[in-house]
Image (tube, rainbow, N blue to C red):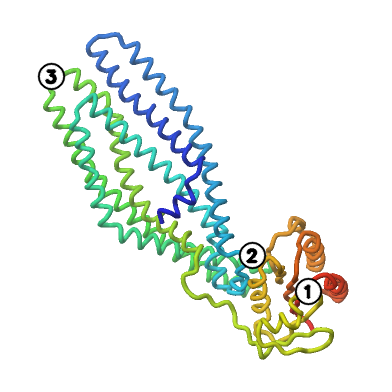
Amino acid sequence: MKKFIMFIFLNKSFCLMLLCIFILQSIFASSTLWIAKLSQAVILKQDISLWLVLFILSLCLIYIPGPGTVYFQSKATFSSFKKYVDIFTVSFKGRARLRTNIEFKQERQPYLNNEAWLVINEFVGFIINVFTTFFNIIFNVGILGFIIDKRLILAYAVTIPLITISVKILKPLVTSSARHAQADRTAMMQSLLPAWDSILIGNQLNIHLWKNYFSDKHRNANHSALKSVFFSELTTIISMFLVLFPVIGTWVWLIYQNIGNEVFLGMLIATFPRQIITIFHVTAIVAYASRWNTLKTRLEGLKSALVITEPINVGTISWNRIKAEKDNTIIHIDSINSIQDITQDYSPGRITLRGDNGTGKSSLLALIKEQLGEKAFLLPPHSDMFFEFSSNKSLSTGEKIITSLEEIKKREKLQLLLLDEWDANLDKNHIVNISEKLNELAKEICIIEVRHRS
């Protein structure tokens, strides 16, 4: 997981974002020192000009690195998201047979379409909060220990094992609930896939069935999300009380030990607001530690979406039920080698695969595509593959196929074109027109097609 996080998120913008946070919190912490020195000067009736100027200056300078943090946060998020998409592309490029597995698509596509962006955006924001809080605690506690009493550092240090113990005890519950929440949220997103057609076509039967299906997934996602939040917040509340005892106890002890020391008490009281903020940040660390278990589970989901850990059903090819037709001659095939022999090692020509539904013709085309890689171009039916004309939403199905063929011919140096049921949902004129274009194209490259119609 560490390597995955480093590879996805570590980039120049991410490092500059952290640098801006470091500078901002350094300036903010310095104002605590100036407050204490200002209080000391007032009580001792000394000149306060220097400390007042430094305090005001620190408040003004804070706003310089702030916009830089936001700017580099945005750049880091987009860079990390692009890197994830690139890795997803490399992981599954050319795995054409996986496309035939609807369950696999429904499981992995939500990660690419929305979950990846949501998790990456949340993680970058999480890192900003964690480092902001961490630097705030380190700098402020260090300054408080330096100017007031070193035992304050010890009091805050004692909270570290207390936080660790409380988080570890509740970690199994937090992690388990987060894992279920992510799975149920992904299932809810999957349930939206049939929504578009069901709603727009308006068949009451389909809408009723879909709404019941969505309501069930929505209810499960809502329940598991609330359960995840409950355990996360429970960890925060318990840890918060554990943190308060040593810090507040040290405050009380220092006050009673220094009764009569006006300078010391003045600095201590003047820094109380900052110490309260520091306590808040310490308890926030607990919340972040608890939230990290949830976020880590979601990151593991992103990582697992990039790999295949178990066999995937990629379709069965019934060789004895598929025949190839070439020049009006029917030829029996028994393996992919038969296809290669019939086409004379994929020489120019046009071959049609015949067979009943469910015999694996589409799976065979996908298998050929996987074996030939960039030498072959697979054009499946009802595909969302991107072309130059993709932005033109007014084209009919037939016009899209014609435009696709023209673009493929113009841009690709192919040995083989694989067409899967290109004639489905086309009128006779379009079929004749496209078939003539395929005959012309078959003089230059090999075409293997599956026809919807005889």
Position of the C terminus by quadrant: bottom right
- Dot 2 corresponds to which residue? 196
Mark 2 or mark 1: name the one nearer the start of the chain: 2
Position of the N terminus by quadrant: bottom left
Q: Are marks 2 and 3 in contact (CB under 8 Å)?
A: no
For numbered disc 1, what is the local secondary structure? strand
Q: Residues within 10 Å of mark 1 (few under 14, many from 20)?
A: many
Residue 367 is left or right of residue 50, and the answer is right
Mark 2 or mark 3: name the one nearer the start of the chain: 2
Residue 8 is left or right of residue 413, and the answer is left
Q: Nearer the viewer, residue 276 or 418?
A: 418
- Establish if 11 lies above or below 317: above
Q: Nearer the viewer, residue 196 or 181?
A: 181
Residue 170 point in image, percent of width and height:
28, 57
Callout 3 amino acid: Gly
Q: Residues within 10 Å of mark 2 (few under 14, many from 20)?
A: few
- Dot 3 corresponds to which residue? 260
Q: Residue at x 50, y 69 (%)?
A: 308
Residue 44 point in image, percent of width and height:
22, 11
Q: CA distance from mark 2 to mark 1?
A: 38 Å
Q: CA distance from mark 3 to mark 1?
A: 97 Å
Mark 3 or mark 1: name the one nearer the start of the chain: 3
Please tell me whether mark 3 or mark 1 is closer to you in this view. 1
Q: CA distance from mark 2 to mark 3?
A: 75 Å
For numbered disc 2, what is the local secondary structure? helix
- Dot 1 corresponds to which residue? 446
Q: Residue at x 45, y 65 (%)?
A: 183
